Image (cartoon, grey):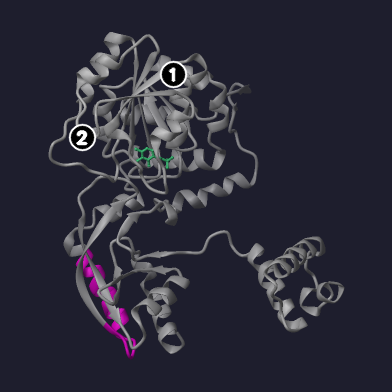
């Protein structure tokens, strides 16, 4: 150990951290009954672990998958102007004070006002993510501790992605009373299930799932009327904004609704709850709100996105979504032209189907991609590209780079990577 830690390559390294890493490495080797042959190899292994700790938090990804929103690629890209302004956080800011009156102040006041204005909502609440919204709504209006019950249709027991199931989250804080059947749920199912324990009527959007054929569900309007008649709270988990207009309309037939800010809204990770003042106020007053509130970085970026909406600016996601067929074809031709310069590479422009992803329901987008082939195996090419942050797809034994979610300014870098791989895969 002593010899290892005192090796010349570790001069200037943090000793305590190095020692902890070395211990973990030795322990692993002991357990797996493996080891390294010489000091140089031990040094190499330890150095790799030390350097991994100091690597940048994120590496850039060139999204050539044709999927605009993926949770594993960080969902929506953010507006660069807003990110530059984040610099203000290198000092102190008036997060919770009113400078005019030298008084304490609610941190999300401005963002909430923007949400109220944009969505024509009586009140708004901002949480860490939409999952927090599900938990907080059920905790406030139908808590298990008070033996309260939430009605939910069997048809909405859906897994969304990454193993996320809204009903499992709800179940952790409320008693779920399931109604109807998988394919058909009628108003009378909800009616018959109502009891003194019932307090919340929840509706969860299908997101990336659809059901066809012999199906029936209850329109929000009828559910809202029932909720009002029975004195229940109707909460709709929209998953994502579909459009501002759609969300405004949904708000008219629910006491509360929620969605993610980093899906179609195209902003940072946050959960937005809109609804009636007394309901939002009750949520704000619940101790769990403190656990779900957002930090200053989120609040800053969300506020900037909402201001962008107010001023008619497009989010980067919207800009991608509004690319028409001509724009996409031109983009593909540009990438094709750049890639065609590479010796030993065959490149073709092909039509593709891009998708919104992120559990948002929307028709596929007619897009284009550049299909590339070289004298290395397509899987090998795919992996070599992936390692450099270029995420494409393998289709019929070729790598396809869909241009829908690529930025043109990155074409040069992508071309460079392909060139590099063909030189030494
Ligand atoms: C995506 C989604 C969620 C989870 O939202 P997060 O912001 O990722 O927590 C919840 N419900 C529905 C219907 C969704 O589509």
Determine contact: label 2, label 1, CB under 8 Å. no
Image position, residue 35 (x, y; %): 71, 76
Whether disc 1's CB lies below 8 Å from ligand 1 is answered: no
Badge 1: residue crowd in 10 Å (few <14, some 14–19, many ≥20): many
Viewer-closest of 146 and 401: 146
Does label 2 or label 1 sit earlier along the sequence?
Answer: 1
Q: Main secondary structure of the magenta part?
A: helix
Q: Is residue 424 above or below residue 316?
A: below
- Which residue range is magenta in the image? 328-346
Q: Quadrant of residue 385?
A: bottom left
How many numbered discs, if any?
2
Q: Quadrant of residue 154?
A: top left
Q: Is residue 306 above or below residue 406?
A: above
Seen from this angle, which residue lies furthest right? 2
In the picture, measured across the screen, residue 98 lies left or right of residue 379, that is right
Q: Residue at x 67, y 69 (%)?
A: 32
What secondary structure is marked by label 2?
A: loop
Q: Quadrant of the N terminus?
A: bottom right
**What residue sits right under mark 2 in the picture?**
183
Viewer-closest of 332 and 352: 352
Q: Is residue 256 above or below residue 7?
A: above
Q: Is residue 203 above or below residue 4?
A: above
Q: Is residue 271 visible?
A: no
In the picture, measured across the screen, residue 355 lies left or right of residue 114, that is left
Viewer-closest of 60 and 111: 60
**What residue sits right under mark 1 in the picture?**
142
């Amino acid at each position: 150990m002593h010899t290892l830690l005192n090796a010349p390559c570790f001069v200037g390294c943090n000793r305590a951290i190095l020692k902890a890493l070395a211990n973990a490495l030795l322990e692993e080797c002991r357990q797996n009954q493996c080891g390294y042959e010489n000091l140089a190899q031990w040094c190499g292994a330890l150095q790799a672990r030390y350097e991994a700790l100091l690597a940048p938090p994120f590496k850039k990804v060139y999204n050539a998958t044709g999927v605009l929103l993926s949770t594993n690629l960080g969902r929506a890209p953010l507006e660069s102007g807003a990110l530059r302004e984040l610099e203000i956080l290198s000092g102190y800011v008036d997060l919770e004070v009113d400078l005019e009156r030298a008084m304490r102040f609610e941190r999300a006041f401005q963002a909430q006002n923007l949400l109220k204005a944009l969505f024509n909502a009586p009140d708004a609440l901002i949480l860490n993510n939409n999952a927090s919204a599900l938990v907080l709504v059920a905790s406030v209006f139908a808590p298990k501790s008070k033996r309260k019950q939430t009605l939910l249709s069997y048809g909405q027991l859906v897994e969304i992605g990454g193993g996320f199931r809204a009903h499992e989250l709800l179940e952790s804080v409320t008693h779920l009373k399931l109604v109807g059947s998988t394919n058909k749920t009628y108003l009378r199912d909800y009616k018959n299930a109502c009891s003194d324990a019932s307090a919340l009527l929840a509706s969860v959007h299908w997101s990336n799932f659809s059901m066809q054929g012999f199906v029936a569900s209850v329109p929000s309007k009828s559910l809202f009327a029932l909720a009002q008649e029975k004195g229940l709270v109707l909460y709709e988990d929209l998953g994502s904004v579909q459009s501002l207009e759609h969300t405004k309309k949904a708000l008219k037939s629910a006491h509360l609704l929620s969605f993610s800010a980093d899906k179609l809204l195209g902003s940072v990770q946050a959960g937005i709850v809109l609804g009636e003042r007394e309901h939002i106020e009750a949520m704000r007053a619940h101790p769990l709100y403190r656990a779900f509130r957002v930090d200053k970085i989120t609040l800053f970026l969300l506020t900037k996105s909402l201001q962008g909406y107010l001023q008619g600016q497009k989010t980067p996601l919207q800009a991608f979504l509004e690319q028409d067929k001509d724009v996409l074809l031109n983009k593909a031709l540009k990438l094709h032209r750049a890639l065609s310069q590479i010796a030993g590479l065959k490149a073709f422009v092909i039509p593709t189907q891009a998708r919104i992803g992120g559990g948002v329901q929307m028709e596929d987008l007619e897009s284009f991609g550049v299909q590339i082939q070289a004298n290395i195996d397509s899987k090998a090419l795919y992996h070599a590209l992936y390692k450099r942050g270029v995420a494409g797809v393998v289709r019929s034994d070729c790598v396809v780079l869909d241009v829908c979610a690529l930025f043109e300014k990155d074409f040069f870098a992508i071309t460079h990577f392909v060139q590099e791989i063909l030189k030494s895969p």
